[in-house]
Amino acid sequence: MKTTPLHAWHVGQNANMAEFGGYEMPLWYPAGAKAEHLAVINAAGLFDTTHMAVLTLQGAKVHDLLQACFSKDLDRCIGPQKGPLVTGRCVYGVFLDESGGVIDDAIVYKCENDDYMIVVNASMGGPIAAHLQKNNPFGDAARIVDWTDKVGKMDIQGPKATAILSRVLNDADQVFDKMVYFSFKGSFAPAELASTSVSLKDGTPLMVSRTGYTGEFGFELFIAPEHVERLWNELLTAGAEEGIIACGLAARDSLRAGAGLPLSHQDIGPWLFAENPWLFVLPLDESGSSLTKDCIGFSALQAAKNAEVTQAFAGFDPRKITLSDKAHVTSPDGEPIGTILTCTTDMAIDRIEGTIVSLATPVGAGRPESFTPRGLCCGFVRLKKKMDVGSEIILTDGKRKLKVEIRDDIRPDRTARKPMKTMLNA
Amino acid sequence: MKEIDELLLPEDLGYTDDHEWAQKTGETFRVGVSDYAQDQLGDIVFVELPEVGDSFAKGDECGTLESVKAVSELYTPLSGEVVAVNEALTDNPELINEDPYGAWILEIKPSAPAEFDTLHKAAAYLEMLKG
């Protein structure tokens, strides 16, 4: 099993370790997954995400290669006006195979005119590099480099992320200036990948991206592997007063599920990418019926009929169903209607007279002054037929039965998209 | 995660293969889960308790513990009738993580008290955990 540069640190902290994507990773630390989940909602959490893979693509034809392989239309993807991807911005999308199934999801970063960077999931650097190479007729005009295990990465997520990160950066005000959601500055390897300069106090270069996988305000940080442990410790020290803690994969999973984000190879995967909550990664035109470019997999999507439907759900208490061969979805009268993709507990939310309220919900907007959420089960199901939001379905492991509700959103009042200026003094 | 040697395993309890414990409290026995079980499960977020008056045979499923990691069944280490359940766990399931031996889950009036002697002693349970 592979490890990240923080492996010894995790083990030294008595983290509960497990295999994920070929790496031995922390599930939670002694604080526990609930405390870690709540830290990200209330203050900040720090996640080791070095298991994720980075590719760089350089050359005059990279744009064309990505247009042919990546679901987003890079000429029409930024802002409500659908402008082109410009230097310093990044977009989320998927790589589809010919049959319209998902190979992996990814964020594509535009570093310079002919320089791009792609972040994919653990163990997917090789397969995505191979997929791109197979579909690359441009040779050296689209050079693909797999940086797997050669880039360190950590995510600082939560309302206090800016305040904490600002203490370890040079010219923090400048770094955070105009840093909108899904934009980035800096480079983890300035010699190979140009960008504006962002550095730690000691001059170490890094890339700061205003993205994440929690639904909450925060950043993903990319830095050379030899600097990972130092930056990790600096951030934990810098944010001690605010209550930053190290967070494991369990909290990462419960936070992302509550935020409605898919886990690749679990909620999206080698089946038709249709009828799901993430179709915004397809370049639909204003009419919403046709696509603005062609791309591998699109013809299969357009030919599809009666595709199964993926929908989000939330329960009424923290109980969940463990995924197994026997786990499935039924109608209230017991008729099998689908499968469970993700089932976890978002521990920052509960129901107040039926309405879901988060710890981040303002008191004026429905959160009681004294609010101690027990958590709600939530996740995604794949159903034979689409159901209306608010419909009740039953999750079962063959023995226990759990009533949950079809939702179009789960955890309210998420902070990921909040304007930077409102978070500087959060 | 705790090292095996760091686990708290009180001497006066009997332990099962499934990591429940039983403790004699007068005519009845209290039942809970071991330090090893709570450590493996992680944060416990929900406890499903049996009803007072329910009867179980040794090894029957008598409740469930929901943790961030999984749902796990609770099996009764002794045959008998449930005479009390720890209602405090309904609102504070994390008590099991904080104090797995103080946070008893149910109390059983045994129909075969000698079954207690068939449970693992602390030392034998520790050996089992070490594999």
Image (spheres, coloured by chain):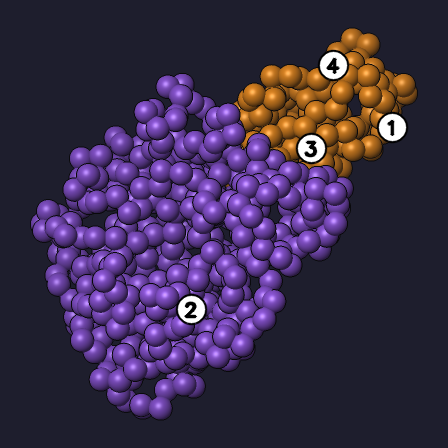
The amino acid pointed to by label 4 is: Ala
Residue B52: quadrant of the picture = top right
Q: For the residue labelled by badge 1, is the local secondary structure a helix, a strand or a loop?
A: loop
Chain of the residue where label 4 is placed in the rendered structure:
B
Q: Supply the letter of whichever chain is purple.
A: A
Question: What's the CA distance linking mark 2 and mark 4?
Answer: 61 Å
- Name the side, left or right, on which B112 lies relative to A127: right
- Residue to which mark 1 is pinned: B57
Q: Which mark is residue A396?
A: none
Tell me what residue is drawn at x 13 percent, y 63 percent.
A196
Label 2, on which residue? A289
Q: Residue at x 40, y 38 (%)?
A: A412
Residue at disc 4, secondary structure:
strand
Give coordinates of residue A323: x percent, y percent.
Answer: 64, 50
Question: Which residue matches tag 4?
Answer: B84
Disc 2 versus disc 3: nearer the observer: 2
**Which chain's residue wears label 3?**
B
Q: Which residue is mark 3?
A: B64
Badge 2 and badge 3 in a common chain: no
Q: Are marks 2 and 1 in contact (CB under 8 Å)?
A: no
Say which amino acid is labelled 1. Answer: Ala
Q: Which chain is orange?
A: B
Is the residue at mark 2 from the same chain as the one at mark 1? Answer: no
Tag 2's secondary structure?
loop
